[in-house]
Image (cartoon, rainbow, N blue to C red):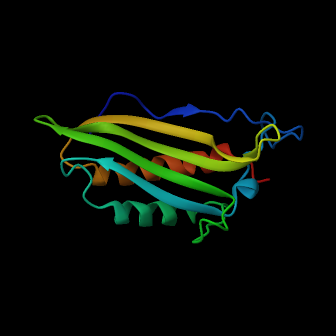
Amino acid sequence: MKRIFGAATALCLLTSPLPAQDGPPTVLTEQNLSPMATMLVDFAQDGCWTDPPAAEAHLRQTLRGTKIELSNDPEAARTTLVLQVNAKRTPEGCYGAVHFSIFGSIDWQGAGIERVVLESVSDIFYGQDTIDAYLLEEIERSIPALAEFLPDS
């Protein structure tokens, strides 16, 4: 597997006046993110991603190993974990990016409820025949890291 960058984290800019466990104030806790829905966004081309359903099943199974409660109903979910893949094929193989983003709703300055990115992690790859196995490895690496980063409540 060839990678240009490791996972780069854009931390949430939203904060709460209540201190989180072992870290700075945050609204990002496993409890506050629950229940969470999942969603795939497939911008892969040229056969670079051949099994999105397996990736979503693995994502949900890996999330079950955390304290984040999952929802099968996006309307009932407090947050949504979006797995987005952008990929294109060249003679050297597929290249592109994998993005994990957690979306939540906020009341933005009294203007109504807006969906915003609370947390985002991305990784850039190249030289893959398909990204199926690579993506399963990324899920195995990223979801436990997210759960470790988040305080329980």
At horizontal 37% and vertical 54% (from top left) the residue drawn is: 136
The foreground one among 3 and 51 is 51
At horizontal 37% and vertical 46% (from top left) the residue drawn is: 85
The image quadrant that residue 111 belongs to is top right
| Identity of the residue furthest to the right in this view | 17
The image quadrant that residue 117 belongs to is top right
User: In the image, residue 66 lies at what x, y percent?
Assistant: 62, 60
At horizontal 81% and vertical 43% (from top left) the residue drawn is: 21
Q: Is residue 125 above or below residue 135?
A: above
| Identity of the residue furthest to the top in this view | 4
User: In the image, residue 51 lies at what x, y percent?
Assistant: 29, 61
At horizontal 80% and vertical 53% (from top left) the residue drawn is: 153
Image quadrant in which the N terminus is located: top left
Q: Is residue 3 above or below residue 112?
A: above
Left or right of 151 in this view: 125: left
Left or right of 86 in this view: 81: right
User: In the image, residue 143 lies at what x, y percent?
Assistant: 53, 51
User: In the image, residue 140 lies at what x, y percent?
Assistant: 45, 53
| Identity of the residue furthest to the front in this view | 111
Q: Is residue 86 above or below residue 24?
A: below
| Identity of the residue furthest to the left in this view | 91
> What number of labels is visible?
0
